[in-house]
Image (cartoon, rainbow, N blue to C red):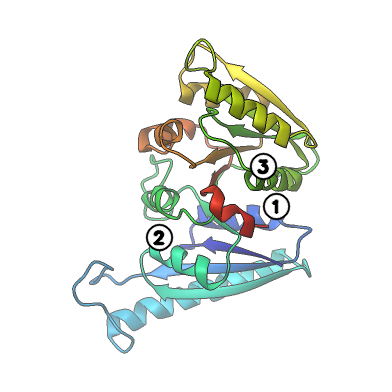
Amino acid sequence: MKNVLVPTDFSKNAWKALEYSIHLFEKDVCTFYLLNAFQTDYFTTTSIMVPEPGEPAYDLAHEQSKDGLEKLLDGLSLMNENPNHHFKIVSMYNSVTEAIKWGIEKYNINLVVMGTKGSGDPENRIFGSNTIHVSDNCNTCPVLIVPENALFVPEIKKEVVFATNFRYKCSQAGVNYVNEIANRFSAAVRILYIQEHEHLDEEQENNREHLQDLLRNISHSFHTLTNISVTKGIITFIESRGSQLLILNREKPGFFKKIFSRSILHEISKKPKVPILVLPETRYLPRLF
């Protein structure tokens, strides 16, 4: 049984993320937790006084949240008849990030799937503030960010791109997870390195060889791009090959610290079609799938 948490604000982008996750786990026995984190117009989670049940503002916001989730379930009943899939709704007063953290622990969540932006984000903003904050702060569970234009097409030949700078030693658990995700897509794994210097140093070379050994039973290939920035290199590689997923690992600061910056995320998603899977630290990976 897999547990997937899908936060929603009832926007079109949130629906796309839910729809995508349903296709991704089409063959799995899976429980989808549909989470709506609500707040009131007069209080926030940083307020000194927290609204409580019985207060008019709280009760109104709570009722709207529950109504929205019930309508979401009604919509799902019309488009998803998979007997392997079960849906549960969760409405709670909190910020989106804190609600997701709570949900991950409460329901033993294997994956968080969310859209790139919510109903309150400007049209010209590619990644919403909640998406960026969740990606930065929910570091105990993988987060799959699904653009509104993303399509899950099972018939075509697929590949997932795992970007690395070989500055950390990949674990068997990490490789197993990447392989598990690749299997969901029936895809090969492409290891992408954007060359920062003329040659790999000894540490990088050892880590590359170690990763190659771990991947020995997995369909994969290694790719290196030179004379190009990290951001443009990743974008160029994905767009030129029609890749289906970008995987990033937040194992150590440095390379991915740049990737997680707001400006870089914006650049990666100027033409958002490819979902981005942000992996947590290796020590959390054995509990995933």
Which three-letter amino acid code belongs to the residue tagged 1?
A: Leu
Q: Residues within 10 Å of mark 2 (few under 14, many from 20)?
A: many
Label number found at residue 240: none
Residue 24, numbered circle: 1
Residue at (71%, 54%) from the top-left corner? Answer: 23
- Residue in the picture at 38% in, 51% down: 133
Task: Give the mark count.
Answer: 3
Image coordinates of residue 80 in percent, x first then y, are 72, 65
Residue 33 x, y percent position in the rendering: 58, 69
Amino acid carrying label 2: it is: Thr
Q: Nearer the viewer, mark 2 or mark 1?
A: 2
Q: Which residue is label 2 attached to?
A: 97
Tell me the element at label 3: helix
Dot placed on the residue nearer the N-terminal end, 3 or 2: 2
- Quarter of the view holding residue 218: top right
**Distance from Cα at disc 2 to Cα at disc 1:** 23 Å
Query: Contact, CB < 8 Å: mark 3 with mark 2?
Result: no
Q: Which residue is mark 3?
A: 175
Q: Is residue 268 visible?
A: yes
Query: From the viewer's perspective, is residue 114 above or below residue 161?
Result: below
Q: CA distance from mark 3 to mark 1?
A: 19 Å
